[in-house]
Image: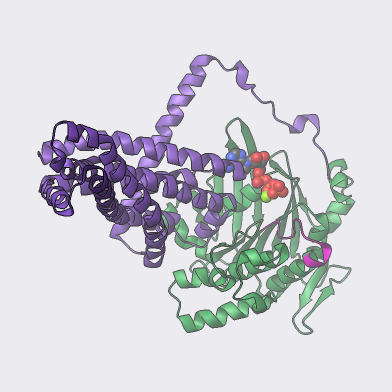
Amino acid sequence: MATTTPHETPPEVAPASRPLTTVVNDTIKNTLLSVQDYTELAWQSIVNLVSPPFYFRDLLDQVDVIGVGSLPIIILTGFFIGAIMVLETAAQFQRFGTTALTGNAVSLALIRELGPTITALMVAGRSASGIASELGSMVVTEQVDAMRAMGTDPGRKLVTPRMVACVAVLPLLTGVADFVGLIGGFLVAHVTLGLSAAEFWHHAIDAPGTNDLIHGLSKPLVFGFIIATVGCYKGLKVRGGTEGVGRATTSAVVIASVSILASGFFLDKLLMYLFPV
Amino acid sequence: MTNAAAPAAAPIVFENVRLGFEQTEVLRGINFSVTPRETAVLLGETGSGKTLILKLAAGLLRPDSGRVRVLGRDLGEMSERELLDFRRQIGFVFQEGALFDSLTVEENVAFRLREERVDESEIAVRVVEALEFVEMADAIAKLPGELSGGMRRRVSIARALVSRPSIVLYDSPTAGLDPVTSQRIITLILRLRDLQGVTALLATHRLQDAFALANFRFDPASQRVLREHEDGASGGPKTRFLVLRDGQVYFEGNDRQIRDSGDPYLAKFLE
Ligand SMILES: Nc1ncnc2c1ncn2[C@@H]1O[C@H](COP(=O)(O)OP(=O)(O)OP(=O)(O)O)[C@@H](O)[C@H]1O
Ligand SMILES: [Mg+2]
């Protein structure tokens, strides 16, 4: 095989010679382009819902992988979050002689804030990375191109089922985390504070109102959307072989987690305004 | 086929196609066309842009400038949605096979038919037919991970031809395979060309494969691969060579012309 002769290698511009302003400009431009690309993918994943073809089997597979697959980790973390909360606050409750309110506090904190956020972060760690690496490997091995070459839209076949699965499954997982968290909280309250089941559960169930439940179960819808679309976006944008897949996986988790926390803040504001408690 | 109106027109035409990434321009004005029932062999060193040209021909990539016409349609004027439908007339054999690794061989080969909502009973027949064509019927229930590289390549050919496309694009179908397996795959390509008359664009950096395509033909009567008559009078020009260099088509001609050219660059290639 012939080797390169001098004129075959095009002259490359050394990166070091680029002035700082160009670098900054390029970075800003690239970031804006990424945001635009992401928005288009996210929007298209919703638009795909209004016209066929639909891929129900892929949707069910994803519900299984993301939903059922995340159950063990959600049960474990939910349980310990509830338990830790009571453990940390028990001393305070005792000091003010208000141990009966333990159920109240755990229940409100879990349902409004900790349940949705912790669940979303755990699922982001597990599924945003899983989605990004799966789609990323498909890009690298040309399976996504093969799909397009056979007339199948990867957006419909890969992105939309994952988006719908995440959005559907996250509120359910959050509900599980809330419930298991209360059990964890109760066990600790029972052992350390000597609270009876009736005392604890009576307050835990009574404390949250309808608006608290709306807060607690609407946030996961948005979080699920973020997890799936960020994972898909990062996966489908993979360049540069298996190494690129690794990088995409990591950044999918980081971006999804930060977006969950940031959007959680603004969602709280919005929900407080719409459904004051 | 929807575009059968003009059989004389070349099924694949590239007009001054340019494509680049960041600072480098890889394709710098590609011009060529493939005539009906012809197999055009794209030869070029690694990184010369063979895969890019095939992906442009399937509309998987869009050129920075220039035009790609396939079956009489200008791909540049089509939306991605139109392209998805259009690509059903094209078979694409990817460089590493690109089989869906979570699906079995049967599901891979049947993928396009299931997408087109073909009747399951017909799918069963056509999948077995395609797998028998590539001699892989035994592997129907296996996963791609359980197959060797050559077997994967053959399944990938079965997947490309199951929908009976009139154009097939082969991306380095013999790269990284031993001579015996390469020969089997070349035989498959000959059979597809000479039995079904597909128009093909085949990328490779192995000149011996290109010569094998030029010098042999599949004889339907005896079901065997025969050497072309030495005078080349048997079936007209079936194989043409396109050699890429510096992002352009550096040489275009048949096997005789490439041997007799005396060009130093091509000579390096012939070794
Ligand atoms: N997505 C991409 N981004 C940047 N550069 C790319 C991209 N795809 C291809 N290239 C570059 O384009 C050039 C041609 O690539 P191509 O894959 O077409 O080569 P090839 O002729 O098929 O090589 P091989 O024989 O190794 O398969 C290479 O230099 C490659 O680095
Ligand atoms: Mg290639």
Is residue B17 in sight in this rendering? no
Q: Is residue B179 rendered magenta in the image?
A: yes
Residue at horizontal 74%, vertical 65%?
B238
Magenta span: helix, strand or loop, mainly? loop
Residue at horizontal 44%, vertical 52%?
B78
**Quarter, ligand 1:** top right
Q: Is residue A164 left or right of residue B63?
A: left
Which chain is displayed in purple in the rendered image? A
Q: Which span is picked out in magenta?
A: B171-181
Number of numbered discs on residues: 0
Q: Identify whether B139 is placed above or below A105.
A: below
Q: Identify whether A36 is placed above or below B3.
A: above
The foreground one among A36 and B147 is B147
The foreground one among A181 and B47 is A181
Residue at horizontal 13%, vertical 35%?
A97
Q: Is residue B79 left or right of residue A100?
A: right
Is residue B14 in sight in this rendering? yes
Residue B100 appears at what percent x and percent y?
A: 56, 62
Residue A251 appears at what percent x and percent y?
A: 47, 38
Which chain is displayed in green in the rendered image? B
Residue A227 appears at what percent x and percent y?
A: 37, 46
Residue B81 appears at what percent x and percent y?
A: 41, 56
Rendered image coloring scheme? by chain
Query: Which corner quadrant of the image does residue A263 belong to?
Result: top left
